[in-house]
Amino acid sequence: MKPAFSPWLAELSEAEVEPLVLASVLLSLVVVYLAAKIGGELCARVNLPAVLGELIGGVIVGVSALHLIVFPASGGEVQSLLMNLVGMTTGQAPGDLLRVFQGESEVISVLAELGVIVLLFEIGLESDLKELIRVGPQAAVVAVVGVVAPFAAGTAGLILIFGIDTIPAVFAGAALTATSIGITAKVLAEMQQLSSREGQIIIGAAVLDDVLGIIVLAVVASLAKTGEIEILSVAYLVAGAATFLVGSIFIGRLLSPYFVMVVNQMRTRGQVIISALIFAFVLSYIAAAIQLEAILGAFAAGLILAETSKHKEIEEQISPIADMLVPIFFIVVGARTDISVLNPLNPENRAGLVIASFLVVVAVLGKVITGLAVFGQPGINRLAIGVGMIPRGEVGLVFAGVGAASGVLTESLDAAIIVMVIFTTFLAPPLLRVVFKDDEGPVSPATPAPELKTADKAGS
Amino acid sequence: MKPAFSPWLAELSEAEVEPLVLASVLLSLVVVYLAAKIGGELCARVNLPAVLGELIGGVIVGVSALHLIVFPASGGEVQSLLMNLVGMTTGQAPGDLLRVFQGESEVISVLAELGVIVLLFEIGLESDLKELIRVGPQAAVVAVVGVVAPFAAGTAGLILIFGIDTIPAVFAGAALTATSIGITAKVLAEMQQLSSREGQIIIGAAVLDDVLGIIVLAVVASLAKTGEIEILSVAYLVAGAATFLVGSIFIGRLLSPYFVMVVNQMRTRGQVIISALIFAFVLSYIAAAIQLEAILGAFAAGLILAETSKHKEIEEQISPIADMLVPIFFIVVGARTDISVLNPLNPENRAGLVIASFLVVVAVLGKVITGLAVFGQPGINRLAIGVGMIPRGEVGLVFAGVGAASGVLTESLDAAIIVMVIFTTFLAPPLLRVVFKDDEGPVSPATPAPELKTADKAGS
């Protein structure tokens, strides 16, 4: 092991690094929570979704502005002001802190991922599997239209209007297909619309879209790398995704009575929440291991446990854990987004901004029309469903990241994709508010949203 | 940044490493929780403290046995079976996973540290500052006797009986002074003895002992390094510790009404727990930055918030977070402990085991007598106080680690210290049960222990 460590250990030994990593993580969490709460509270006061404030808070502390929460993976020279602060307060020279910075960003990244895993687990717990299966056909249509329409219109437009080569155009078109289930689900939960029919269709479609997105990304990435599509690995992905989603829910429902039995037998503290977390993390690990996303496993685990007699207790106990971890995710999404590509004064950005305005239009329209595809649901808010599919969020950033790394995207096209992600992500939460307001109120406000529960508590 | 990464990146790019680190962390957490719950439940069934089961569970999954939860910092060739498992299930060659393993252990270490921070925050919340100040003089006497007695007896015995040189003898003597506040506090909480007078004296003494231990370690480490004591840096530590403990509580109490005011103004979800965590993490960071331990800051934060009107809510919401994070700490303490030094069949261990039996006797007696030093408390359970100070736990492991790294300790003396730490850590929880059983029951069972709260919930 030793030689591998050497480049990091200019001055500090491993025993000295560990407490510094911990201290940096503590300071990062303080920054994350302050940004999340200040952003969230300000947005809540002007009647915007709190999650939008968290994203903006993340942008402010991230790579675009304050450089407090930054990640070495974003490439190039990274200057972390947070590490300078740690250096100043602990008396370490900033240059010695490279290894500490690496550890700190690793930990914050994983905490953010655990945050979105816990969020999707919570969303699963608050969803109704039967309702989800019932709206399944509608959700599937919404997901497929929401992938095909923006992909076809985007790719064709880039080739025909902007004269971009086929492979980069396909890549940019693929980036238009993503939907960020995290952002949409959080806004729906804040508005207590998660259990409405529209909410369940959106969640179902977003989950399917996540699977489709992974498949599209795999196809496009292999196309970008080798110039052709590896049919076998795509078939493996599709089969794996289908088997996982159906299999985990089927086997999970068979096993869930044993889950309740084991939990009832346990006598030590935390038996319910630890058992639930074991279940959620096992499914998340399996989903991650078969190249799907961990959040799909967490969502499936939530859906299964929602049907057990323990679901109230689990919901109650996961709630503070979600409060602690979920903001880290939204702050990190904001912090990783480099909004300097939006500056029209920089001549290098202009070409990108022109393409970007085209992509934004296609991205919004391509998802809004999905609501029209919903059949057999008279009186449903079609616009709300379409708008719910708009935010690209972290999934869009992954497309941009993979595209930039593979080298198929020109700088202006890469920037255009990032601009499209920023616009759809930041516009969708307030838009969702507006389109749901047109409704007469929640269609089936059975489960109270977590937002309310905490507000009640605070008043007591 | 790039060149610094190269040794890790034999095969995997940074974009490929991140999901693998997340997957490894998920699998590690599953292993941690299974070990903690199986160990804890088995111990609870034979009427032993659950935390002992978690420590033993940690030993079983750690470096001593299954090699599932291991850390590169423990030195030498490390074989992580967990990483092999990750390699197998994700199709990566184990050799490519070095960088992933590094990330995974970093994250698990920090989660363990966050666990003990949350534990001490919870202990602080359940403690009574006024009672703690009232028993302060007794706690101080217990702490000082518990440092001086084992240090003097241990060092003298090693020099006079075993003919060991002064500096290594002083180092081993210093390792005898530590007290693991985490283990003692957890056992007290499990027995609902945290708010008893004995419990508060033990907690107060253990906190002071933690500060004394840091000072002793600094003195001994500088002695080992340069052969002399750096008076200035020791004076700085002492002044810093005193200023921090008094100052944080004084300023914290002045600011706590504003804390309640701000929380009451907030409208978004998680306002109570996030505000409490910001407070706890800021104090933890300050404590870590001035070379004290982060847990001292967390304890101080808990003490201060315990006096606000929000303390019930904070206690309720920190409880599932503690359930999630605290077991990671105890499993990691167990996993880092190499019990192979206990094997008497290995001739290399024998010299160490002879010294170890001497150290264990001094370690136990040196702390047990501290109960005798308590004055002006008629009818108090002196034996319980003494036994409460016995476990060296993770603090003892730090002494052994620093000693081994500085090279002043011979292999057998290093092994003897580890054996002493293992014995005191694993014997104290059952011993505490026995000595508290002799009592007529809890002296002042005002606050229900968290153990009970969860048990109630499970029954509902």
Image (cartoon, coloured by chain):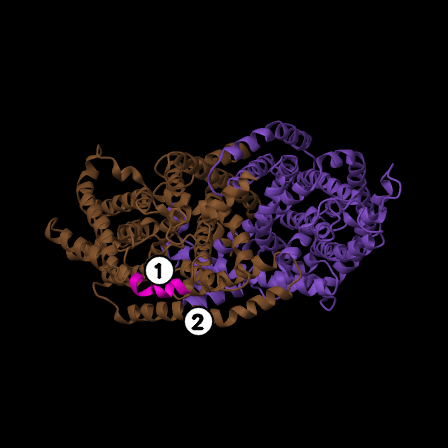
Chain colours: A brown, B purple
In which quadrant will I find the N terminus of chain B?
top left
Q: Which residue is mark 1?
A: A204
Neighbor class of circle 1 (other Cα within 10 Å; few <14, some 14-19, many 20+) is many
Residue B137 position by quadrant: top right
Depth order, front residue of A169/A104: A169
Coordinates of residue A124 in the picture (x, y in percent): 44, 58
Q: Indicate the position of residue A194 as horizontal and vertical percent values.
A: 40, 53
> Which of A270 and A227 lies nearest the eye of the viewer?
A270
| Local SS, label 1 | helix
Q: Which residues are magenta?
A: A130-139
Is residue A255 shown left or right of residue A392?
right
Identify the amino acid type marked 1. Answer: Gly
- Is A137 magenta? The answer is yes
Provide residue B205's location: percent of width, then percent of height. Answer: 75, 40
Mark 2 neighbour class, 10 Å CA radius: few under 14, some 14 to 19, many 20 or more = few
Q: Main secondary structure of the magenta part?
A: helix
Residue designated by label 2: A250
Residue at point 19%, 54% (across, down): A168
Query: For numbered disc 2, what is the local secondary structure?
Result: helix
Q: CA distance from mark 2 to mark 1?
A: 17 Å
What subunit carries mark 2?
Answer: A
Query: Where does the image place residue A130, in percent across and percent down from the top left?
Result: 41, 65
